[in-house]
Amino acid sequence: MFRIRTALPLVAVLATLTPAGIALGATNLISNPDFASEIDPWWEVDSNGAIQFWKIDNGELCSMIRNPGIEPWDIVIGINGLAMEAGKQYEISFVAHAEPARSIRFKTGKGSPPYSDYFLKEVQVSTSPETIAVSFLNTVEDADTQFQFHLGGATGTVCFDDVSVKLVSSTPSQSTEPYVSPSKTGHPLREYKSVVGIGSAVDANLLVSSPEHNAILGGEFSGLTPINSMKMENLVPVRGAYSWSTADVIVDFATKNGMDVHGHALVWHVQQPDWLEVGSFGRDEMIQIMQDHISTVMGRYVGRVKYWDVVNEAIHHLGTDTKPDYSAYDYRSTIWYDRIGKDYIELAFRSARAADPAATLLYNDFGIEVQGALKSEVVYELIRDLVGRGVPIDAVGFQMHLMTNESIDFAAVRRNMERYAKLGVGVQITEMDVRIPQPASAEDFQIQAQMYRDALSACVTAPNCDYFTTWGLSDNDSWIPKWFPGFGTAHLFDAEYQPRPAYHALTEFLDTYDTASPAAEPPAKEPSPTDSSTKGSSADPGPSDDGGGGCSLSASESGARSNWMLVLAGAILANIRRRRLRS
Ligand code: XIL
């Protein structure tokens, strides 16, 4: 995260940001950083009627904005030719002031068509000169990267000086201070590894820029899942050219800190590279692409990545995102399903087993936690069929994206875990977060804490559930505000890295176990199961408000068909009403 310090020398700001591994004296990639006598080679463009006049004033580059345009970003000031390497940590810093105060943006990006952003940040600039510094992981190798400031929004003046973009380090910034856990029990979450693994999802930018984040990550958690760095668009943006640097940084951090890695996600329909989306590949070529991807990625991390989400979110309601139809579920239409057919799932798992026979292979999905919910039934039948036919699926990942304002039946979650155990299939909670409609009240945080606790309790008491992972460590790496507008504050730590009641609920729950006891042993003090139903809900609507409906599958179903039809028949026999979408 960026820090702003008034009247502090630059070195002090950098030292605050990255106590370890600062390459002071590293080359500044900006060729005219201090505007001593000329503006060149900086350039400017404006759009939407924005007009600025610029000049060097008192050794600074000052923009006088006469017409701010329509967007606050209509004036762009840029410089080309920064040779930046992927997988390395860079520090951008500059001094700025504005009259009146305003927010501005700065970015790195591709400077030729198709223009794109590599890193973009919005910051507040006040009337007195301040040093703004941000450290980030550069993920794109580009010898001609462009750096830009974006201005506008109000008439007035904005001045810049001492602009620098420097290579800082290629390793995550780690605090040299010993970690002090905020746990009131005296034991951080990871000390209960023998009871249950507790994981956090990790955003690469934070990993290389925030010692505070990393101290908590390594100090509290026994495992991690890369949030985006192992998704196909990031690993293989160009066909055949894998870009490992960011994923490697995360895996190395885990190795150094004795943490398990949960790889995410090999076969999914989101965040796929353009070459794959637009390419017209037939079935055989798609199978080849999928198998090559699985064997290449898993092969690289053999022995270092213990769990893999092999197939993610393959089952979907009928209808579209804008017009969902929850009355039935089927294979989701994706490039994998559409181009290969339903057997892409088993082909994927068989390739994964061959690529790393020791890894735990998961099918991962949302809205499949509660037994009785239509999607849970459909996914259960899918897994039962696949496992019954010898497809190597070791576990099912319940994502558990919940919200405080809808209820979830945790007794049904426990039953769901149990029935997978009977199949000989493990379960994990893989992406837990509990979003709260904003603004959040103190009561909301209590409800949230109870839901986290109930989910952990369900996992710990199920003999087949060995991992509980939260999707984002703090509000700083939250996907919630962007994906669920109006919601937020979903994580164990807030944006200041302070623990929420939910964090304490987890440590207090685990305190009923011995830090050294294996999960299968009964706890010293088993908490009473007051948690059968808590307010909150899964991302996918649960069954409680409607009683169900029908489920459907493609007409070409064969062996598995009878199982699915049983579910269908059950639903019809129960004469349950059609599902309706919760508001
Ligand atoms: C989300 C990430 O958190 C976002 O940063 C990204 O823009 C979209 O994907 N289920 C999954 C995750 O399996 O990969 C998703 O992660 C959240 C839902």
Image: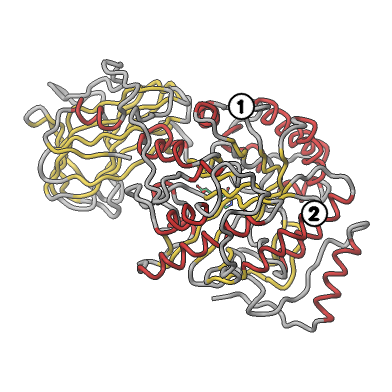
Q: Quadrant of residue 26?
A: top left
**Which quarter of the image is occupied by the N terminus?**
top left
Q: Quadrant of residue 142?
A: top left
* Residue type (three-letter) at the residue carrying disc 2: Ile
- The location of residue 422, given as percent across then percent down, is 81, 56
Where does label 2 land, which residue? 383
In the image, 446 versus 119, the foreground residue is: 446
**Coloring basis for residues:** secondary structure
The correct choice, above or below, for 386 with respect to 91 in the image is below
Q: Residues within 10 Å of mark 2 (few under 14, many from 20)?
A: many
In this rendering, which labeled residue sits more in front, label 2 or label 1?
Answer: 2
Q: Of all residues shown, which one is farthest toward the left?
A: 58
Q: Quadrant of residue 461?
A: bottom right
The correct choice, above or below, for 339 with respect to 229 in the image is below
- The location of residue 145, given as percent across then percent down, is 40, 27
152 relative to 581 in the view: left or right: left
- Per the image, label 2 sits on a secondary structure element best described as helix
* Residue type (three-letter) at the residue carrying disc 1: Tyr
Where does label 1 land, which residue? 242
411 relative to 83 in the view: left or right: right
Residue drawn 44% across the image and 31% down it? 112
- Per the image, label 1 sits on a secondary structure element best described as loop
- The location of residue 541, given as percent across then percent down, is 62, 69
Residue drawn 19% across the image and 44% down it? 125
Q: Which of marks 1 and 2 precedes in the sequence?
A: 1
Residue drawn 71% across the image and 53% down it? 314
**Which quarter of the image is occupied by the C terminus?**
bottom right
- The location of residue 536, given as percent across then percent down, is 53, 69
